[in-house]
Image (tube, rainbow, N blue to C red):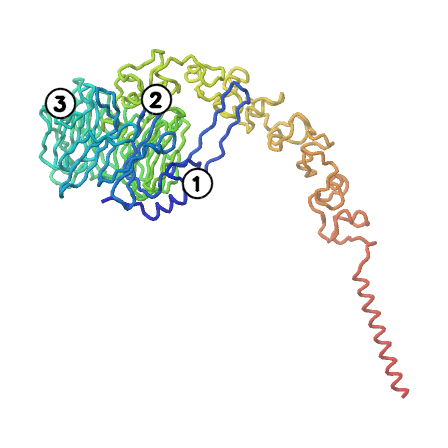
Amino acid sequence: MKKKASLYTLALSIILSLVVGSINGSSVVSSTSSIQDSKNHLSQKTDIRTYLEDLDRYIILPTENSYLTPSHVLDLENDGILETIVVADMEGITGEIIYLIRNQQIVSSWTLELYWEMRDIEILGKYYLNSGNDLRILFRYTHTVVDEDVTSIFAITEDGDLDPAFRIDLDGSFVQGTILHDLNEDGEKEFVLMHTDGIVYYMDHSGQNITNWPKTLNETNDFIPLVVDDINDDGELDIISLSEQGQIHAWNLNGTDISGFPLQIPLHFKDSLAEHFRQMPIIADLDNNGTKELVAASDVMYLYVMSLDPQKNQSWEIIMPEGALMTTQGVVNDIDNDGLLEIIQLLPRSIAVFKFDGELEEVFSHMYSSIGYFGSPAIADLDRDNKAEIVIHNNQYLRILEDDGEIKKQLSRPLYAQDRKPPLIYDIDNDKEIEIVHLTQSGVMFIEETNDFGYAPWIYTLGSSANTFNIDSDNDGLWDYEEESIGTDKFNSDTDSDTASDGNEVNRYLLDPLFSDISLDTDLDGLTNIEEADIYFTDPKNPDTDFDSLEDFEEINTYFTDPLSADSDEDGLSDDYEILYDSLDPNDPTDALDDFDNDNLHSIDERSWGTNPENPDTDEDGLLDGDEVFKYFTNPLEVDQDADYDGDGLTNVEEVDIYNTNPSLPDSDSDGYDDGEEIRRGSDPLDENSIPTDRTNFSQFYLIGYILTGLVYVIVLRNRKRNLSEQ
C-alpha cells in the first residue's frame, strides 16, 4: 500500500514553492535565507573569468507527489555530467512518475508516468543492450497478480521512454538490494538477488538462471541482501549471504560452495533465538593482512567481526551502545586516513565507530538523539583536510561529524518522520565541487555546498553499486563505479597518461582524466594546474581561491601572502586592503592597531569608517579623521566642519572646542532652552538653573494680569458698597 505525503509535508512544500515561485511541472532552485550573499571580489581583468561561489539551496519537485524511493545518480550521456533519477508516488492514484534531473532542472521530455501497482521499487542503474549500443535504465518492483506477489524488472530508454521489449518477471517478492553488475567480466551485467523464501538467484542479462543456480537455503530472509566480493583471493567475485541467525554462505560464480562454508557467527546468545541480524553485512580486509573479514551488527547490541578464512575460524565481538535494527546500516571507510578501515555503525539513536587490527576496539560512540536515525552514513572529505566527514540524519536535522565524532555542523531540516533515505554526496551542478544532496519525502531536494573538490564519492546509499565494499581495481582513488560514469579505464590508474592518476585529476586537480591537461592554466591566474594542486593547494578553477580580490599568482609571487586566506596575518584587515597602502603590511599582524597618520584613528578603525589611513584629514575639511569620529561626531568623509547636526544654532566644532556642550544634543543641560539660544542670551548652557534673562516671560505677564484684575475687582466692590450706603 502506497504511503501518501502527510498534510505537514504537503503544507511545507506549498509554502516553499510559494516562496520561490511556481514550479509549473519543473523544478525551482532557490538559495536558503540563512545563507550569506555570494561573494565575488575578483580583480576586474578581462583575462580572468568570473568565478561565483555557490550557495546552499533547494530544488522543489512537484508537491502533489511523495518521494519514498532512494534517488539514483548516473552519467546518462557519458559526458561527465551527472544526472539524478527520482521516482515519485502519484498522490491518490495507483502509479509512479519517473523524473530525470539535469543541471538542477527536471527534464520535461523525460518524465514518464506509469499507472501500475508498484511496491518496493529499486532503480538498478545503466545497462547496454545489443552489444553495448542501446542504453537502458533498469528498474525493479513488486506487484500482485491474482493474489500472488510477482517481482518485475523493466527498462527505460535514454530518452525516458518505456521499452516494451524488455521485461523480466519472477514469482514472489525479493529483498531490497538487487545487484546489477558484470560479475564474470564477460561484458554483460548479471542480476544477483535474494528471494524472501531464502532462494539465491544469479541470472544473466535476460533473466535466465545461470548454470547451477539458484541456491535454496533452509530459512526465509526478509531483510538482508546479498553481497559480492572476492573472499578466497582467486581473482573472481563470489556471492555471499548472511542469514538472520548468523549463518554465512559463500559460492563461486559456477555455483559451487567455497571450501569451508557455510560458517556460523558464534552468537553471544548461543542458546536463544532472541539474537538476529537485520542489516547487510560488510566485507573488507580490515587489518590489511590479506584476508577478508565479515562485519555484522545484531539487534542485541553486539558487533561481530568474522574471518572469512575457514582455516582460521576466528571471530571477535564488542558491545555497541544499542541494538542494530533494519532502519540503519553500517559502512566501512578509512575516515582518519591512517591506512586502516573504520567500521562506522549507525544505530537508531546513536553512532559508534570501531577499528580492527587483530583486536576489535571502539574508536568513539555517541548517543546523539532520542529521535531515530535512518539509512546509512554518507562518507566524504568535505573540507580538504584529507580526513573524511560522516553525514547522518534523522527527521529533524542533518549532522556532519568529524572523524573523531565531534559535530562539525548541524543543519536543520524539515524532514518527514518516515523519511529514511540517506543523503548522497556528488557533483550535482557540474562545478567540480561535491554537494550533500538529500531528497525528503515531501519532494524538497536540499543541496548543501561543501566547496570541496570532487565528483561522486558517495552516490550509492552503501557506497557501492554492487552492495559490497567499494572496489578500486587500479588503486587510482576512483571507485570502479565512478570510473564507469566518467569513462576512464578502471584497470588503468592514469587513463590519459599525463602522470597524474585519474583519482587525483577528478578529486584533487579538477582536471579531465581523459585529456592531458596538468600543465595548463585552467583559471588563467598564472599558475599551472599541477602547481596549484600539488604545491600551493589552491583551486585550479578559481583564480582567487580565498576571494580577497587578489589572484593566486599575485599573492604567491608578488605580495607573499597566503592564497588560502583573505587575511594572511589575521589582524582584521584583508590582504587586498593592506596592499593598497604603503604603511600597511599584509604579513604584519600589529599594524592594524597603529595610527600612521596621527589622526587619532587606528588602521582597523580607518578601514571600518572608510577613511584613508595615510591621510589625517580624508575629507580635507580641517578636522582630523579621528576627531570627527570620536570628538565632533561629524562625518570624516564629508566637508562638514561647519555642520550643526543637532540643530541648536552652534556648529559641532563650536560646541566641543568653545562651549563644551554636547554636539549631539540641542539642549545640553535639559532646561528647555537650546544651547545656541542660551549662548546668545547670556545664560549658561551647561547649568539647568541658568536661563536667558532678556527673554520675555509670559508667565510674569499672566501673574501681573491676575493681580490687576483682582485690584479692579476690589475697587468695583468698594464703589458699590459706598453707593449703597449713600442711598
Identify the mark at residue 21; answer none if there is no mark: 1
Q: Which quadrant does the C terminus fall into? A: bottom right
Crowdedness near tag 1: few (<14), some (14–19) or many (≥20) residues, C-alpha within 10 Å: few
Q: Is mark 2 on a helix, strand or loop?
A: loop
Q: In this view, does 320 lie above or below 688?
A: above
Tell me which numbered mark, 3 or 1, is placed earlier along the sequence.
Answer: 1
- Residue shown at 39% from the left, 24% from the top: 432
- Which numbered disc, 3 or 1, marks the residue closer to the eye? 1
Crowdedness near tag 3: few (<14), some (14–19) or many (≥20) residues, C-alpha within 10 Å: some
Identify the residue position indicated by label 3 in the image.
252
* Residue 517 seen in render: yes
On screen, residue 547 versus residue 443, left or right, reads right
Picture mark count: 3
Q: Which quadrant does the N terminus fall into? A: top left
The alpha-carbon separation of the residues under discs 3 and 2 comes to 36 Å
Q: Is mark 3 on a helix, strand or loop?
A: loop
Picture coordinates of residue 526 (x, y %)? 49, 15
The alpha-carbon separation of the residues under discs 2 and 1 comes to 31 Å
Question: Toward which corner of the image does residue 271 lie, by quadrant?
Answer: top left
- Residue shown at 33% from the left, 29% from the top: 83
Q: Which of 51 and 292 is in front in this view?
A: 51
